[in-house]
Image (cartoon, rainbow, N blue to C red):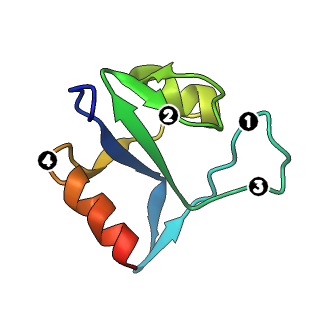
């Protein structure tokens, strides 16, 4: 943001309905020990790239989930560019 760019935070979740319940499938990153898994993963995005230490270097958004998790997982906006400054302030208070 200090450089005039427009970062935002994406959330990845893979859910499926199982009867009346929602199942949150584990997200297991490729190339890391198999005991690591999340049901939700957050990543900083900017200028068409995802910046995630798990990936090692910036990855184009359209290839991100396939490269990191080995499957296509929708990325949704968790914190928009406009909400980001307030989000950081709120997180520092907690």
Going from N to C along the chain, the mark reached first, 3 or 1, is 1
The quarter of the picture where residue 8 lies is: top left
**Residue topped by disc 2:** 72
Please tell me the numbered disc located at residue 36: 3
Element type at mark 4:
loop
In this rendering, does residue 34 appear at all?
yes
Q: Is residue 63 above or below residue 54?
A: above
Please tell me the numbered disc located at residue 30: 1
Determine whether, in the image, residue 86 is placed left or right of residue 44: left
Q: Residue at x 60, y 22 (%)?
A: 57
Closer to the camera: disc 4 or disc 3? 4
Near mark 2 (Cα within 10 A), the count class, few <14, some 14-19 or many ≥20, is some
**Residue topped by disc 4:** 82
Q: Work out how far the residue at label 4 is from the one at label 3, CA to CA, in angstroms.
A: 32 Å
Q: Work out how far the residue at label 1 is from the one at label 4, CA to CA, in angstroms.
A: 32 Å
Q: Nearer the viewer, residue 22 or 88?
A: 88
In this rendering, does residue 70 appear at all?
no
């Amino acid at each position: 943001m200090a450089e005039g760019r427009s970062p935002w935070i994406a959330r990845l979740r893979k859910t499926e309905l199982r009867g009346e319940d929602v199942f949150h499938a584990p997200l297991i990153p490729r190339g890391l020990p198999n005991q690591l898994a999340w049901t939700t993963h957050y990543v900083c995005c900017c200028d068409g790239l995802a910046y995630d230490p798990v990936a090692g270097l910036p990855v184009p958004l359209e290839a991100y989930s396939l490269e990191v998790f080995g499957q296509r997982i929708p990325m949704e906006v968790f914190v928009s560019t406009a909400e980001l400054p307030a989000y950081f302030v709120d997180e520092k208070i907690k």
